[in-house]
Image (cartoon, rainbow, N blue to C red):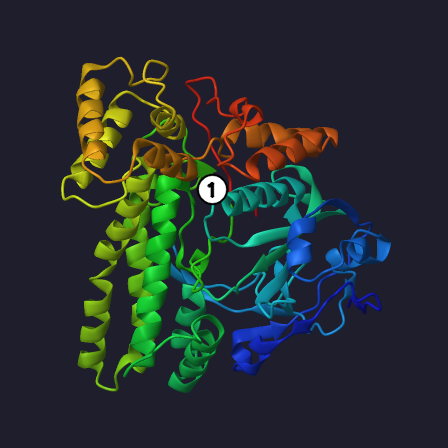
Amino acid sequence: MGKKSGNDAGWNLENSYMRLPDFLYKKTNPTPVQSPGLVIFNKKLGVSLGLHAEDLINETGVELLAGNRIPEGSIPIAQSYAGHQFGHFTMLGDGRAVLLGEQITPENERFDIQLKGAGRTPYSRGGDGRAALGPMLREYIISEAMHGLGIPTSRSLAVVTTGESIIRENELPGAILTRAADSHLRVGTFQYAANWGSTEDLRALADYTLERHFSDGDYGENRYLYLLQKVMERQAALVAKWQQAGFIHGVMNTDNMTISGETIDYGPCAFMDTYHQNTVFSSIDIDGRYAYGNQPHIAGWNLARFAESLLPLLHENEEQALELAQEAISAFSEMFRFHWMKGMRAKLGIFNEEKKDIALVETLLRMMQKHQADYTNTFLALTFNWQENFELGSSPEFKEWYQLWQERLARQEEAEASSRQLMRDSNPAVIPRNHQVEAALSAAVEDGDYHVMERLLHILSDPYAHTDEQSKFAAPPVKTSIPYRTYCGT
């Protein structure tokens, strides 16, 4: 059991989740580690949370980030949830994560603070509850890159080494990630409550969620239908941003879909280089269930499972509840399309709407797939008018498309300069390229050199700056016959 820390470091913790029925969590202390050492601390995030960096990077603070000490006000718990994993339903829960509590910031915002890799919990199911350094640094890099890109995400506050080895396929250095999130409520949390709790337990969870995430809304006549619709809207906007950035989550199980609309659980995720709808990186996604082009469909499927869990609350009559749920879910595709097209118009410098915009966007994407064009760099080339310096530039079909695009821009009131600025603000100079992330992780894990990672994080922190320094990180990897693969890192 971790000791209570006398060093408050700015902690202002509450434990509101414990107001819920106790089958939704288990009190669980982190398992102390042998010899914790700080790898990286996110000072900007720490300040925004109201934490004092100087009190968290010293010896006592690192003991806290490792779980050897518990901050004042914390009642550590592991949360229960279920999930459809690759379509198969199972009982799950925090098998290696401990929620310390909710930090109340100086602006009175509320963020979960969680230690990932903090040891065994009642939900570990035979696992050791630990995490390896590489995957924890990977989550730090990708989640902070997503934040820079303006994509809702959990954030990474710190990574510490444990001084212990963990056994996977090989012996690996252990680490713990401190994660901040709007909450860790998941679609799978509701599935768990619906399957193993009473209707009143489910109602308590739904009311808590409304209070925490949608307290300023007008619930109308049916507060639980409102909850379903708002979660759908947030997920439609989120997945649209994934598609616009070329991000592939890799494991869109229902336990990895948040109610808050944040990206969470960066396991086998990656960013696409060469554009293709069927792009898959995850080593376990053999059939491409979570491929890039399938992500909107899977989001809708997951939300249908969320709707199913809410049926007892939507209406006392089962048939009417099902009708309400089906009507709501049927709107998701249009919701997603609206957010996706809004973002794609911006990537092309288009301010207003025309019916033919969809054809303009989809024609460009088909050409990119046909010519194996780099997704991010194609939009950069359009942004800065580099017509002859990218894969599509010399093709006759692109030149025909380009003329249609220019005619489309000419039909809007905004000047060309405004369109160019919109494109600069919508098309990143850099993304966390897979080969660069791997280089940073290799240097850190194998050589103990964190400078490569620190420089990459600096470059990714403001991806819309379009600096000369960033241009050096824009090159795609050298093409190879060996496909890039990512792994869950559990």
Q: Amino acid at mark 1?
A: Cys
Rendered position, 428 above or below 386: below
Tell me the quarter of the picture where residue 256 sits. bottom left
Residue, far left: 355
| Number of residue marks | 1
Q: Is residue 118 left or right of residue 33?
A: left
Q: Considering depth in this image, is 343 or 160 the residue closer to the camera?
A: 343
Position of the N terminus, as image quadrant, is bottom right
Residue 36: x %, y % from top left: 79, 50
One can see residue 287 in this view: no
Q: Is residue 216 left or right of residue 320?
A: right
Judge the density around disc 1: few (<14), some (14-19), many (≥20) Cα neighbours within 10 Å. many
Disc 1 secondary structure class? loop
Rendered position, 433 above or below 55: above
Q: Is residue 235 left or right of residue 74?
A: left
Residue 158: x %, y % from top left: 68, 50
What residue is disc 1 on?
A: 269
Q: Residue at x 60, y 73 (%)?
A: 26
Tell me the quarter of the picture where residue 462 sits. top right
Residue 394: x %, y % from top left: 27, 12
Tell me the quarter of the picture where residue 374 sits. top left
Q: Residue at x 25, y 87 (%)?
A: 316
Residue 471: x %, y % from top left: 52, 23
Q: Considering depth in this image, is 370 or 414 the residue closer to the camera?
A: 414
One can see residue 214 in this view: yes
Q: Considering depth in this image, is 23 or 233 the residue closer to the camera?
A: 233
Q: Residue at x 61, y 60 (%)?
A: 97
Q: Residue at x 43, y 26 (%)?
A: 483
Rendered position, 91 above or below 17: above
Rendered position, 169 above or below 237: above
